[in-house]
Each structure stands twice: as C-alpha cells, then as structure tokens.
Amino acid sequence: MQATFEIRNELYADVVVCGGGVAGISAAVSAAKSGAVTLLIESGGYLGGTATKGMVGPFMTCLDAKGENQIIRGFFSEFVNRMIADGGAVSYNDCPGGDSWSGYRLAGHIGVTPFDTECLKRTADRLCVESGVNLLCHTTLIGCETDGRRITAIYTADGEGIDKIRAKVFIDCTGNASLAAKAGAATFRGDGDGFMQTASMFFIIDGVDRDALDAHMAEHTEMRERFYMDAIEAGRADGRFPCGTMKLRIYENPNGTWTVNMAQSDDPLNELSAADITTVEIAQREQIQKLIAFLREEIPPLRNIRLVATASDMGIRESRRIVGRHLFCLEDITSAVKFDDRIAVCANSIDIHQKVGVAYTAYKSGSNYYIPLSCLIPKDMDNLLAAGKCLSADKYAFAAVRVMPPCFAMGEAVGITAAMAAAKGVNVPDVPVCSVQEEIVRRGGYIG
Ligand SMILES: Cc1cc2nc3c(=O)[nH]c(=O)nc-3n(C[C@H](O)[C@H](O)[C@H](O)COP(=O)(O)OP(=O)(O)OC[C@H]3O[C@@H](n4cnc5c(N)ncnc54)[C@H](O)[C@@H]3O)c2cc1C
C-alpha cells in the first residue's frame, strides 16, 4: 500500500522564509519591507529559534575588532533598540566587558547585548506584524517540489493537514539547511573530518548573590581563580561535576535572572536525528540537576540559586550547511578579504566549542572581516538563498559568524536580495549586488 496525503490549502507568496530564528526573522521582515508578499514558517510556537527555544544569550558583539565602533547595524540595531525601549535589553554601550552582563569575561565580550527571551519573542512578533509578514508558527517544512534549478513549491504540515506553498523565491533559515537538502541542493555536515561543535542545553537560574560574585571577580583577575576552574576540575575528578565544561559561565539577564552555559554533550551526536537529540536532551536535563547541586556547594555566591527553567531545545551550535557559490573560509577572515559582493562586516572571534580532553579552543581573529553574498547562494539553485547557520562556510569561518549579530545581518541581506529577485522576476544570482548593497546601507547597515 502506498502512503498518500491530501493537500488542504494551496498558498502563494513572493518570498517564503523557512525557519524563524534571528536570521529568519531578519530575512522575512527585510523582504516584507521591500514590498514582497512574504510568508515566514516556523515549526516552533514562537519566533527566535536558538535565541528563545534555546535560551541562548547575550547577543555577541556588534562592535569592530577594536571594540570601538558599531559595525553590525541596520535591522539588528532596529531590533535591539525596540527591545531596549521595551525594557528587555541592555545597550552594547553599557556592556564594556568584565561585568555580569558579559559573564565577567575580561576579553572578547566587549559590546555584547543582554536581552530577555520574552522580550525577543514579542519584538519579533511586532516587527513581523508591522511589516506585513504572514507568519505561520507550528508549521513544519516537510517536502519540496523542484523543476531543474528552481524550487516550485514547498509542503508544510500542522496538526490539521498539509499545505502546498508556491513562491518566486525561497530562503532557508532552518539552521540545518533543511530546505536546501529537501530541494536536492548540495549540502554538507562537519568539515570533511566529521568535526562538529558540541551542543549545550542552556538553563536559567535565580538567587545569585550578585554583590558577592562581583566582589569575587574584583578580587581575582587570574582565569583559574576568577572562574573557579580548580574547583570544577576537582569536581570532575570525583564525579560531582558532570561534563567537560572548564569554567563558570553565567550571564546576568535584564530581568534579574541568570543564564548558565555549562551543560554540554561531550560526545558527538547526530543533531538531525530526533532519537539522538531526545537521548542527549534527557541526559543534559540530568546533568543540569548535578550542575545546580555542584554550583550551590562549591561557589559561595551561588549558594542559594534555584533552577528557573531549562531550554525547551538544546542549543545546536553547528549543523548541515549549503554548498554555496563561495565557501567562506578561514583565509577570508585572517586576510580580511574585502569581497566585491560583501554584505556585512563582522569582528567576532573564531569561537570553536570542542572537546579536546576537557579543553576548548577559541581562535582570535584580531581584525574586521567581510561576509560575501555568494556564501548565501547555493551553487546549484536559482531561486534559493540561505542565511544564519545554513551559510556556506568552513569550520573556522562558520565559528566566527554563527553568533547572532552576523545572523541578523545575513538575514537582512538575503531578505533584500530575495525581494529584488521576486520583483524583477530574475534569478537570485542575477540580482545586481550593488543594488543590494545600496539598500543595506540605505537601511542603516554597514558594509565597510
Ligand atoms: C549553545 C549555544 C550557545 C550560543 N551562545 C551564543 C551567544 O552567547 N551569543 C550569540 O550571539 N550567539 C550564540 N550562539 C549562536 C547563535 O545563537 C545561533 O547560531 C543563532 O541564533 C542561529 O540563528 P539561526 O536563525 O541561523 O538558526 P536557529 O536559531 O537555529 O533557527 C532556526 C529556526 O528554524 C526552525 N526550523 C528548523 N527546521 C524547520 C522546519 N523543517 N520547518 C519549520 N521550521 C524549522 C527552528 O525551529 C528554528 O526556530 C550560541 C549557539 C548555541 C547553540
């Protein structure tokens, strides 16, 4: 017997964005602002992706490599300013590094933006509604129809049935290149050597004695003492500390709670497999119980902490990506290649979370670098773009731009490009890059 299904509705849009993380929000609002009839589908119940379901934060830096000038602007600034006005974020101006907003990190965390996940959810809702984005949450991309190098329609499912959605241009912001893979476009996972960054379940606590923690940090500038690394190492040796994390990693949130980035999967997992993720998430929720007990016992300012919530989705740092017209790579960053088709300037360090015994490596970039549009266009499709974690990049370049401010910037660029392709009735690669760049700059973005 063959499985069959009926199509409930046939829908149409100029631009369809799959995935409502920060890249997808940015892409959809940017396309809609250009006048494109835009549909954003998201499998979760609200927008934000890793930022909300994964409870990840703060936004990493939007400043240049010297930590002086803001270089990620445009839609990112609009979004952050709306959250600040709503009382749900702290400006990068007020985050000089070394303090509770930046996890007391003395390097690499200048100019972060702490935010409340609830504020992010409603800010995304409001910007979608105001710009005219048609938003369908609880809607999962399940299939795709193609004709040569073009996607003609996608299939989506909710509890009631299956819809077919046609569009002129599609954007993959699923965080795992789901749409590109379903369309038969070339994709890859890992970096040839199968390497993937570790995944972490974030959790929120309250009850931190901030004055005591501030005092501890003021007293200790040396890493091992500052971040209780000896206690953690000893705890790991005697089995009370449950994973490979090496130091205290907690960040204050604007609502008075604290985000903890300490649980993690030390072993490789298949992040595309529900069975694998379920198993690892069960293990991480147990890990978190042990972590809470350990933190209460060993870190005096955390003696009275309580668990407020664990993330509904474990944070997946790295997954499947497109094979683009350009593979953004380490050399592009270290040589600061100034691409003719650049759509953003960034300076976040190359931040690779990996297990090497129990050590993790962070490579520093040291100067600003440029993201080209060509790493957001699949090499084998004419009406598909990708942004955020789906971009075409090697493990180093990926590790630099996977953080949220660059994801916003990539989303804005592909939203503008998609709307132009749809309006002119041309293939994505035929949209003049200079028009995209002009529009990015007109909207307050910066491309150097
Ligand atoms: C553990 C961890 C810690 C991090 N720490 C920081 C940090 O401190 N600061 C920082 O700036 N960045 C941090 N990052 C990086 C950053 O959070 C992410 O890389 C970024 O949010 C990715 O955004 P995105 O929109 O590309 O993808 P995602 O946030 O993954 O969004 C993809 C969306 O697509 C949806 N989706 C997927 N498949 C489908 C489908 N088939 N149908 C419909 N919808 C679908 C998902 O539900 C999701 O909402 C961290 C990441 C992790 C995992």
Image (spheres, grey):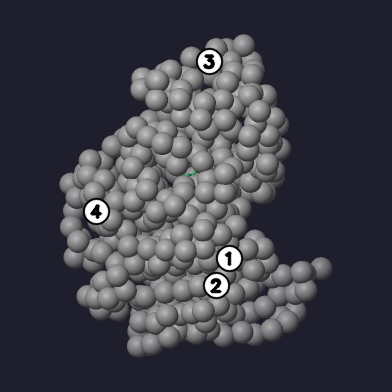
Circle 1 crowding by C-alpha within 10 Å: few under 14, some 14–19, many from 20? some
Q: Are marks 3 and 2 in contact (CB under 8 Å)?
A: no
The secondary element bearing badge 3 is classed as helix
Q: Are marks 4 and 1 in contact (CB under 8 Å)?
A: no
Q: Is mark 1 within 8 Å of ligand 1?
A: no
Circle 2 crowding by C-alpha within 10 Å: few under 14, some 14–19, many from 20? some
Pair 3/4: label in front: 4
Q: Residue at left 35%, top 82%? A: 420
Q: CA distance from mark 3 to mark 4?
A: 38 Å
Q: Earlier in the sequence, mark 3 or mark 2?
A: 2
Say which residue label 2 marks: 126
Q: CA distance from mark 3 to mark 1?
A: 40 Å
Q: Earlier in the sequence, mark 4 or mark 2?
A: 4
Give left or right: position of 343 versus 19.
Answer: left
Residue 52 visible in image = yes
Above or below 222: residue 331: below
Say which residue label 1 marks: 122
Q: Is mark 4 within 8 Å of ligand 1?
A: no
Above or below 379: residue 317: above
The secondary element bearing badge 1 is classed as helix
Q: Are marks 2 and 1 in contact (CB under 8 Å)?
A: yes
Say which residue label 4 marks: 69
Q: Are marks 3 and 4 in contact (CB under 8 Å)?
A: no
Q: Residue at left 61%, top 41%? A: 204
Q: Earlier in the sequence, mark 3 or mark 1?
A: 1
Counting from the top left corner in percent of width and height, residue 282 is at 71, 37
Three-letter amino acid code at disc 3? Answer: Ala
Q: CA distance from mark 4 to mark 2?
A: 28 Å
Counting from the top left corner in percent of width and height, residue 355 is at 47, 28
